[in-house]
Image (spheres, grey):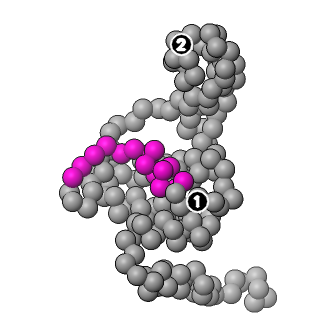
Amino acid sequence: MFCPHCAADNDRVIDSRACEDGRAIRRRRICNQCKKRFTTYERVEQYTLQVRKKDDAREPFQREKIEQGLERACWKRPFSREQIREVAARAEAHIMSDYEAEIHSSVIGHIVMQQLAALDHVAYVRFASVYREFKDVEDFVAELAPLRHPTPQPPSRESTL
């Protein structure tokens, strides 16, 4: 592993632990040359899932793109980088468990929106505005309506006893 600080190929692992619900290993390393520390992540390499874009172009699935979209949506919101990675990991796990060869980009957007809706409404609306290509204020209002007035849930059996 090349050191990101001095580019030396001489480091050692000082700590390893599972992360992303056991789907990755986080390793803390120290460069033997410059003595600076850095973190790497090890994940199982999976088959190449293809993402079909709106223009019918295909490209390999890249979890990093989900993380980038989440970072933009969660900008100036109370979320750590690790929380964003966890949301991306859950979305990726959902995608990988349900799709084998190809997935449409709109499905990925929908899955990420579901994750954000449960996490933070502001981040959800930010993501939705890009994903659904809002054209005017009315698009925002239509997206906010279900968040402001959620459909009432029928009373549970325990509450009627």
Q: Is residue 67 above or below residue 38?
A: below
Classify residue 55 as left or right of residue 32. Answer: left
Per the image, label 1 sits on a secondary structure element best described as: loop
Quarter of the image for the C terminus: give it.
Answer: bottom right
Q: Residue at x 68, y 15 (%)?
A: 35
Q: Which residue is mark 1?
A: 74
Residue at screen point 47% across, 32% down: 44
Q: Which residue is mark 2?
A: 8
Residue 97 seen in the current view? no
Q: Residues within 10 Å of mark 2 (few under 14, many from 20)?
A: some
Q: Are circles 1 and 2 on residues that touch, CB within 8 Å?
A: no
Which of the 4 quarters of the picture holds residue 158?
bottom right
Between residues 122 and 25, which one lies in front from this camera angle?
122
Measure how far apart labels 1 and 2 are at the Cα level.
Answer: 34 Å
Which x, y percent locates residue 160? Answer: 75, 89
- Residue at 50 percent across and 32 percent down: it is 43
Q: Nearer the viewer, residue 131 or 22?
A: 131
Residue 9 belongs to magenta span: no
Magenta residues, as a range?
A: 57-71
Number of numbered callouts drawn: 2
Q: Position of residue 88 (x, y in %)?
A: 52, 50
Q: Nearer the viewer, residue 112 or 123?
A: 123
Q: Is 136 placed above or below 128 here?
A: below
Amino acid of disc 1 = Cys
Of pointers 1 and 2, the one earlier in the residue sequence? 2
Residue type at numbered disc 2: Ala
Residue 50, given in percent of the width and then of the height, sits at 29, 47
Q: Around disc 1, counting alpha carbons within 10 Å, would you say few (fewer than 14), some (14 to 19), or many (20 or more)? A: many
Q: Is the magenta region chiefly helix, strand or loop?
A: helix
Q: Which SS class for mark 2?
A: loop
